[in-house]
């Protein structure tokens, strides 16, 4: 029991020591993680370009994201991912693949931005905040595409795909340039998604 209390005290002390730079890095990471929920590779390419130009500083161990080989890999993957979502019915198959990939990418995006933390706390925040936000936004896009397919027979899906690409690009830019504003907008959007989901399930319970 005393050992657990001592460990808890250490974690609290670590959180209290968080500097402004670390908090900003966390805000940038969470914003980029949300962008991963729209498109997996767009935010990773944004991190790569920002790191190469010196605008972002990556955490130790993530320097590979800011390399030129990574530019080629992320750039190619981004183009393929964007174009593939415009192929009818392939978009639903891609959702099965990109859903877990978005969580992994969101976790990496947050972890790559967070510095001055112990590995345990860093990866805990990355998984819960980064992976969780990516999962939330990915789930919202999947639900929206499913509704579009049901009501339009898939004809409205290209429009959904376009909105997702633009959303991923805009969110990535906001996360890098104005991370606090981006975080506030994401918080509002998350609240809206949770509220809509709650109303949906409560409505179904009342019908039953």
Image (tube, grey):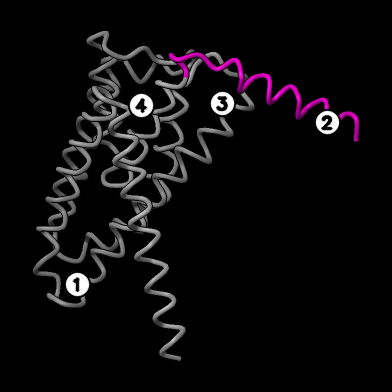
Q: Is residue 113 left or right of residue 35?
A: right
Residue furthest to the right: 2
Q: Measuring 28% from the left and 19% from the top, which residue is drawn there? A: 69
Label annotation for residue 149: 1
Q: Residues within 10 Å of mark 2 (few under 14, many from 20)?
A: few
Q: CA distance from mark 3 to mark 1?
A: 39 Å
Q: CA distance from mark 4 to mark 3?
A: 14 Å
Name the residue that disc number 2 marks. Answer: 5
The earlier-in-sequence mark between 2 and 3 is 2
Disc 3 is placed on an element classified as: helix
Q: Position of residue 131 (x, y in %)?
A: 46, 42
Q: Which residues are magenta?
A: 1-22
Q: CA distance from mark 2 to mark 3?
A: 20 Å
Q: Position of residue 164 (x, y in %)?
A: 19, 49
Disc 2 is placed on an element classified as: helix
Number of the front mark, 3 or 1: 3
The chief SS type of the magenta part is helix
Q: Measuring 20% from the left and 30% from the top, which residue is drawn there? A: 75
Label annotation for residue 28: 4
């Amino acid at each position: 029991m005393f050992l657990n209390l001592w460990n808890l005290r250490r974690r609290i002390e670590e959180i209290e020591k968080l500097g402004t730079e670390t908090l900003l890095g966390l805000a940038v990471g969470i914003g980029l993680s949300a962008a991963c929920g729209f498109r997996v590779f767009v935010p990773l390419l944004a991190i790569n370009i920002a790191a190469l130009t010196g605008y972002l500083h990556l955490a130790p161990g993530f320097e590979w994201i800011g390399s030129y080989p990574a530019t080629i890999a992320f750039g190619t993957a981004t183009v393929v991912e964007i174009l593939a979502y415009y192929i009818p019915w392939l978009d639903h198959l891609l959702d099965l693949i990109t859903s877990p990939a978005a969580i992994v990418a969101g976790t990496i995006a947050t972890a790559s931005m967070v510095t001055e933390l112990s590995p345990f706390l860093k990866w805990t925040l990355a998984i819960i905040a980064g992976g969780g936000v990516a999962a939330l936004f990915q789930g919202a896009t999947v639900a929206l595409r499913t509704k579009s397919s049901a009501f339009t027979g898939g004809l409205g899906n290209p429009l959904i795909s376009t909105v997702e690409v633009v959303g991923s690009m805009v969110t990535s830019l906001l996360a890098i340039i104005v991370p606090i504003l981006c975080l506030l907008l994401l918080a509002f959007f998350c609240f809206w998604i949770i509220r809509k989901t709650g109303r949906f399930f409560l409505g179904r319970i009342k019908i039953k």
